[in-house]
Structure formats: C-alpha cells, structure tokens
Amino acid sequence: MAGGCEGSVALVTGGSRGLGKAIAHRLAAEGATVAITARTMDPDDKYVGSLRETCDEIVAAGGQAFAVQADLAQSEERERLVAEVIEAVGSPDILVNNAAVTFLRQLDEFPERRVKVMFEMHVFAPLHLVQLVLPGMRERKRGWICNMTSIAADKPPGPPFSDFDTAAGFGVYGMCKAAQDRLTGSLAAELYADGIAVNAAAPSDPVATEGAGALDLAKTNTEDISLITETAFRLCTADPATFTGRIVRTQPFLRDVGWLT
C-alpha cells in the first residue's frame, strides 16, 4: 500500500519537535520537499526543539525543508502560512495536521478561553488548512491529508470508571479529537471523487516525545515514536481510491499491512 513521495510537497504542522519533527524527517527521507510550521523558529532555552533545527537536520541528511513560523490559532496566520509555502516550494500534495495545544483539567473547572483555543487548534485549524490547500490538490486530482488524532477520542469505559479516567482531565482533549475524527470521515466522503485521501492516525498507547513532560502525560506503557511515524507515512502515500476515511490505531494497522509482527 505504501510507497515513496518523491517530488511531492508536504506541509507538516507542529514540526519543531516531537512527532511533527519525526514525520517531517520521514517524508523528507522519502523524497518530499517538506514545509514545516510551528511558533518556535530559532533555538530557545525555554523550549525543546525549533523549526530551524529541524530544517538543518533534514538538509544535513540530504533532504529539502522550508520553515514558516506561524501561530495556527489565528486564521490570518494560517492563510499567510499556506501562501508562503505555495510561493516558496509549491502547493502541498500532502498535509499533516499535527500541531496541538493541550490543557488538562477536569471539566467542571475548565476555563472557557482554554476550551476555545484547544478547539481552534485541533478542529478549526485543520479544517481551514484543508480548505487552503484543496485548490491545488483538486487541480492535480490527487492529495493526502493525515490528521493526527488520539485514543482519547474514545469515551472512557465504565461504569465503574478508573481513577485515571475521572482525574486525568482529558475531557476537552478527547472532545477535540472526537471532532477531528468526524472531520476526517466527512472530508474523505466529500473529497473522494477528487482523488484525495483523508485519514487519521492515533498511537495505540501514549507516545513520549520531546516536550511531553510539560503535560504530565503517562510515563509508562509508552509507544515508540517510530510506530506512529510509520503509520503517518503510510497514510500519506496510500491509494486514495481504496484507502480513505480511516481512523487507524498504530499497532493493529501496522500488523495488518505486515510492517509489525
């Protein structure tokens, strides 16, 4: 099912660190010109990773990369981002919606402004970016959209409910990811005739990436980042005629395609 992406242009959001950085590296290694975006352009002691570092690493490895600093919570910033990418490297063939902002708190005390910014980043921004890159994809009659989602979209099993389910504060995050999953299915249906694949990927277990410690995420039973990176790569190169509208979990998916035993 998977193949290379030689000659394509890939836009990866949240590419300064963690999963976005890993996906950008993989797509570049497979021949794509990778455009990455995040809020951190230059190295800063306050943060782990930056766009410039990711670009430098990709170029040093023989790939092609271009960075645009942008705050994806702002509509006008999203428009500027896509315009700059198109001008510099061409209209994206691949869009990976990976950027996120996460606040963890129980729902009865969750601030409205933080709910809004999370939905802006996880739902409105991905939809808007799809709208912005669609003209080029439709013109070429091909494209790949990959939304990075989460098992948090599933409702907690119960009753009874575990202490983790009731205290971890993943309610708003799960709401955002559930909306993103539904967005994936709707886009896949609407864009099928245009030859554009729209899929979503979620780790089977939490992934420990750079900077995740600030979220106080689970530090045990974590999944190697290579599994979600491989999954994203395959979704960005799958046949749009046969593989679209899927919400996949890394380990079952990679077993099904024979990459993982």
Image (cartoon, rainbow, N blue to C red):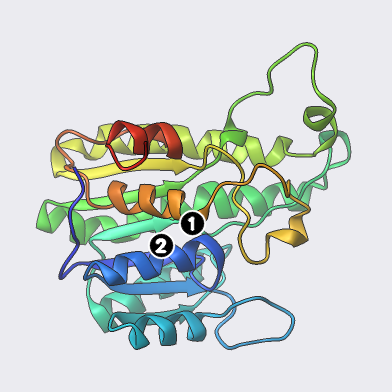
Q: x and y percent of residue 20 in the render?
A: 48, 63
Query: Helix, strand or loop at disc 2?
Result: helix
- Quadrant location, the C terminus: top left
Residue that label 1 marks: 98
Q: Residue furthest left?
A: 140
Q: x and y percent of residue 34 in the render?
A: 32, 73
Q: Is residue 69 above or below residue 165?
A: below
- Cβ atoms at labels 2 and 1 below 8 Å apart: yes
Q: Amino acid at mark 2?
A: Ile
Q: Is residue 135 left or right of residue 118?
A: left
Q: x and y percent of residue 105 in the render?
A: 82, 43
User: Can residue 73 be seen?
Assistant: yes
Residue depicted at x 33% and y 38%: 187
The residue closer to the viewer here, 66 or 249, is 249
Query: Helix, strand or loop at disc 1?
Result: loop
Residue depicted at x 40% and y 41%: 200
| Quadrant of res 55 | bottom left
Q: Is residue 150 above or below residue 87?
A: above
All told, the count of numbered labels is 2
Residue that label 2 marks: 23
- Quadrant location, the N terminus: top left
Q: x and y percent of residue 156 in the render?
A: 69, 23
| Quadrant of res 109 | top right
Q: Is residue 189 above or below residue 47?
A: above
Q: Amino acid at mark 1?
A: Asn
User: Can residue 249 be seen?
Assistant: no
Q: Residue furthest right?
A: 109
Residue depicted at x 80% and y 12%: 160
